[in-house]
Image (cartoon, rainbow, N blue to C red):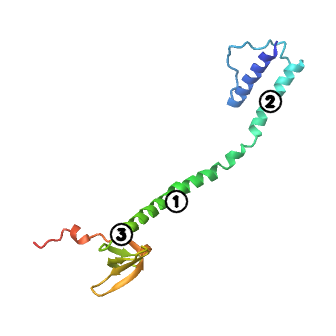
Amino acid sequence: MNWFSVYVRMCELLLMLQDGAAQPTATAVESPPAAAVTSGSPLGEGIADATKNLGNAAKDAPPPPWMQFLPFIAIGLFFYFILLRPQQAEQRRRKELLTLLKKNDKVVTTGGMIGTIADISSDGTRVTLRVDDNTRIKFLRSAIQEPLKDTTESNGSSAT
């Protein structure tokens, strides 16, 4: 019996132990003669002990270290895609909206004031809102919530 056939047989036994199969399957490689793998020979006992020990070691071995961090990675990805990414998109949309503001746009401030932009400062950080005919209030550009959408036209209220 050569060492290669012993190695192949050990690999087959290990695979059977991992799969939990009780009976060995037929293979293309000849199995070693029964006389070579008897309980009296040191080679036969060594193979049997090695396969038993390897089978127990595979069951008792702790998972690889990267598997312990897998739940934390999954939670991090969850937070990124559910919380952070939509928030970044909203901030990008808001920044674009604030840069597109111009004179005579109707806007709503974060405090709920409704007015028309009367003037924008030269540095672009302050906006003067005309709230009434003679009332003008200065706000920071970041205090503007959104442009006011005309709801009276969309209601379709017509005098019939």
Dot 3, crowdedness within 10 Å: few (<14), some or many (≥20)? some
Neighbour tally class for label 2: few under 14, some 14-19, many 20 plus, Cα within 10 Å: some
Under tag 3, what secondary structure? loop
What is the CA distance from the residue labelled 3 to the residue labelled 1? 26 Å
Percent x, y of residue 59: 74, 37
Q: Which residue is mark 3?
A: 101
Give how far across and how far down residue 157 sits, in percent: 17, 71
Position of 152 with respect to 3 (left or right) is left
Quadrant of res 48: top right
Q: Quadrant of residue 115?
A: bottom left
Residue type at mark 1 is Leu
Residue lying at the far left in this picture: please name it: 160
Residue 68 sits above or below residue 96 on the image: above
Q: From this viewpoint, which residue is outermost toward the bottom?
A: 134
At label 3, the amino acid type is Leu
The residue indicated by pointer 2 is 52
Q: Quick one: SS at disc 2?
A: helix
Name the residue carrying label 1: 84
Which badge, 3 or 2, is on the more N-terminal residue? 2
